[in-house]
Image (cartoon, rainbow, N blue to C red):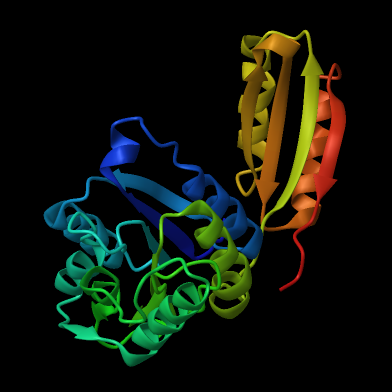
């Protein structure tokens, strides 16, 4: 089976590891990357530690099949925001005060001053710190916040992104900047779902094993929904016709199933 280029997500934050904050960013980005044809290979959650971020970034960069790397969180104005410094070290780049990032920050401060939200038009030391980014990046638009999202080419057709951890900022940047600009050209999977009502999951072992033997280019997984007393079998693959054939075969192997949905990816 052809292997599409993959994505690695690195979520940075002590608050995620402590359970104080739920990581909704990773699931959102995984959905968007899957639909664009860059399915997520791995999601890592690491502490606000330079060493931990460096290790995670270098692991991802070292895997040539990983075409997109998203490092999310830890780029704010306080001392515990260490992601820019960590990525700079991981990529063996210096930090610089990026003029595009600084102009964006300055513009927001000016508007905040005009609105009476801050007492000075001068960019504070903390906010200015947000403009210190690894050399050689592209500043992406963040119209919902101050921290500058960045994009770095880390190989032929390979990109690393540094994104703010604030969900309303990240989701907007992903939808408006990352996906349309950097996630084009992928081959998204087609997906189908078959529902088995009041069927024990263990009874699907044999048909799923047979399906795997006959369709090695289609991935099938069973997902129990306990409270609804239902098991959903989800099938996916790069060849839509093969996915549909595998779906029909699954219904033959265990006729108690009902086709719930089948869809093809949207074209980029």
Which residue shows up at 61% across the image and 58% down it?
Answer: 32
State the residue in front, 88 or 97.
97
In the rendered image, the vertical position of residue 209 relative to residue 177, given as above or below: above
Quadrant including the C terminus:
bottom right
Q: Quadrant of residue 198?
A: top right
Q: Is residue 83 left or right of residue 239?
A: left
In the rendered image, the vertical position of residue 177 relative to residue 71, given as above or below: below
Which residue shows up at 72% across the image and 58% down it?
Answer: 239
Q: Quadrant of residue 146?
A: bottom left
Q: Is residue 90 left or right of residue 222?
A: left
Which residue shows up at 33% across the image and 46% down it?
Answer: 44
Residue 70 appears at what percent x and percent y?
40, 62
Which residue shows up at 40% across the image and 37% down it?
Answer: 21
Q: Quadrant of residue 91?
A: bottom left
Quadrant including the N terminus:
bottom right
Residue 232 appears at what percent x and percent y?
72, 26
Q: Is residue 111 left or right of residue 189?
A: left
State the residue in front, 228 or 173.
173
| Res. 156 in view | no
Residue 30 appears at what percent x and percent y?
54, 52
């Amino acid at each position: 089976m052809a292997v599409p280029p993959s994505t690695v997500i690195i979520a940075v934050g002590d608050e995620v590891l402590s359970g104080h904050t739920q990581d909704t960013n990773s699931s959102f980005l995984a959905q968007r990357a899957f639909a664009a044809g860059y399915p997520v290979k791995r999601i890592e959650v690491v502490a606000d530690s330079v060493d931990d971020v460096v290790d995670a970034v270098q692991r991802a960069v070292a895997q040539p099949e990983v075409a997109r790397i998203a490092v999310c969180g830890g780029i704010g104005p306080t001392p515990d925001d260490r992601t820019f410094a960590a990525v700079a070290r991981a990529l063996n780049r210096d930090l610089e005060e990026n003029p595009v990032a600084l102009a964006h920050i300055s513009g927001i401060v000016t508007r905040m001053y005009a609105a009476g939200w801050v007492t000075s038009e001068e960019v504070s030391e903390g906010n200015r710190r947000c403009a210190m980014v690894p050399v050689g990046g592209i500043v992406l638009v963040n119209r919902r916040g101050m921290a500058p999202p960045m994009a770095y080419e880390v190989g032929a057709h390979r990109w690393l992104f540094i994104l703010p951890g604030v969900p309303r900022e990240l989701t907007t940047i992903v939808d408006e900047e990352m996906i349309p600009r950097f996630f084009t050209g992928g081959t998204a999977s087609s997906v189908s779902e078959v529902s088995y009502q009041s069927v024990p999951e263990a009874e699907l072992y044999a048909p799923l094993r047979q399906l795997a033997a006959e369709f090695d280019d289609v991935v099938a997984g069973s997902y129990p929904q306990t409270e609804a007393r239902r098991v959903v079998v989800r099938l996916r693959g790069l060849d839509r016709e093969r996915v549909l054939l595998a779906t029909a075969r699954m219904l033959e192997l265990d006729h108690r199933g009902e086709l719930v949905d089948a869809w093809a990816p949207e074209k980029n």
